[in-house]
Image (cartoon, rainbow, N blue to C red):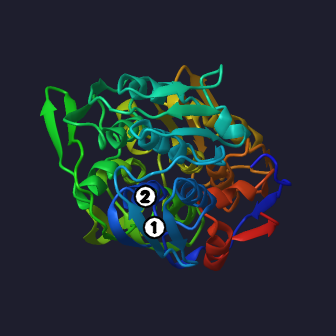
Amino acid sequence: MSNLVPSPIQAEPSHPLQGILCAPGDKSISHRALILAALSAGCSNIQGLLTADDLTHTASALRQCGVSITLGATGTCVVEGVGLSGLCEPSNIIDLGNSGTAARLLMGVVASHSIHVTFTGDESLRGRPMARVAAPLMQMGASVTTARHGGMPVSIDGAITPIPITYRLPVPSAQIKSAVLLAGLNAPGKTTVIETLSTRDHTENLLRVFGAEVSIEAIGSESHIALVGQPELRAQDVIVPGDPSSAAFPLVGALITRDSKVTVQGVGVNERRAGLFQCLLEMGAELTIDSVETACGEPVANLTARTSSLKGIEVPAERAPSMIDEYPILAMAAACAHGATVMHGLGELRLKESDRLAAIVEGLRECGVETLVEEDSLTVVGAGPDNIPEGGGRIVTQHDHRIAMAFLTLGLAAKKAIIVDDGSMIASSYPGFVGDMSVLGASFSGSG
């Protein structure tokens, strides 16, 4: 990302947002669907796959390991699986761009295959922590070498005979959990991950869809997720739900922009991803959830948001795993609310594509919004419904797609236009963002 020419985008105070969108495919589920289809026997057909840079990198990495993948332009995908032991050793270093999900999940996959793989990425991804993923994989018999700072490049020699383990997560992380479970697929016996705070369970749901035996047992305050190794994974037809993290931007845009009403269809509403929606409802948002259905173990619904008078709330730390990617857009809603919103347990934001906590604070202050950070807690003092944020800031995105989209959304409701220094990285997760928002009535200018 950092090698691209910056593409600034300006968001101007907007006309009402009106209309209906279909949410882009869920990024987390798209990664997992590609990987499990690759490890299955037979031909899998995937519909609704996210067509974004991060998924292009995942598909490319799997192709380099011998998997045939055909990506269609509209989210269709055909994967010729090679089975659990069919991956081959790539001839070159695998570049994963900006995708932390691809990096951590593929580390788990490779760890239980007797091949050598080196992963790298762009400047942002190389700075993100990988040692905490490497630790359990080495317990399972893989040899893993990270860069001196604990990040990428990462070189892995997969275990010849993987060892099933019981691993207690040191931090709530669906990516670490998923890496261990994916490595456990090739290990004889039972691999167990213990978590004290529940994280997104897309991997567990899709493992079951593809034929693996996964059980979850509550023991005291902990969840024990157990996978029986060496299953016969079978090709599937998969429908990927819409991404709640992407749907959040037009929905919050409608809540904070006058006279607006926006519906986003086909959104995944897994309770472990619904923390933002819970917060918005507590803030007084007119947000309705209709037509709940199920696709591949995931609940899917249509969400409608109307302009609302929001109030500040306190968000507990234990909610963080269910909305870790949504704090930037929640902070924008908080900037337009009456009173202070206090968000606890945000330490993980410092380890995302950017230091998101710092980027949120610096950006809001540029826009005239009062903020306070105390350890891992962020307070945003809202301007209130009759005193909208000043805006007028130029936001340093730190090459972070969610920071860019969050501040562009705030710009629609501010007094003065907001400029983000670069919108090129938005393509990593929501390449249709500018077009979708513009169809609803948003006023953007620039080349992002």
Residue at 60% of width from left, 65% of height from top?
Answer: 257
In the picture provided, is 277 more to the left or to the right than 72? Answer: left
Using the rendered view, name the quadrant where residue 356 is placed: top right
Q: Residues within 10 Å of mark 1 (few under 14, many from 20)?
A: many
Residue at 56% of width from left, 43% of height from top?
Answer: 100
Residue position marked by numbered label 2 in the rendering: 285
Q: Position of residue 285 (x, y in %)?
A: 43, 58
Q: Position of residue 438 (x, y in %)?
A: 67, 74
Q: Position of residue 145 (x, y in %)?
A: 56, 25
Report the number of numbered marks: 2
Instruction: Check disc 2 and give the amino acid type.
Output: Ala
363 vs 354, nearest the viewer: 354
167 vs 329, nearest the viewer: 167
Residue position marked by numbered label 1 in the rendering: 305
Instruction: Give the answer, above or below, for where 342 lies relative to 392.
Output: above
Instruction: Check disc 1 and give the amino acid type.
Output: Ala
Instruction: Give the answer, above or below, for where 309 lies relative to 170.
Output: below
Determine the CA span between mark 1 and mark 2: 8 Å
Q: Which circle's residue, 1 or 2, is located before the other in the chain?
A: 2
In the picture provided, is 119 more to the left or to the right than 22? Answer: right
Q: Position of residue 197 (x, y in %)?
A: 30, 32
Using the rendered view, name the quadrant where residue 446 is placed: bottom right
Helix, strand or loop under label 1: strand
In the picture provided, is 181 more to the left or to the right than 388? Answer: left
Q: Are marks 1 and 2 in contact (CB under 8 Å)?
A: yes
Residue at 64% of width from left, 66% of height from top?
Answer: 431
Res 270 visible: yes
Res 409 visible: no
Helix, strand or loop under label 2: loop
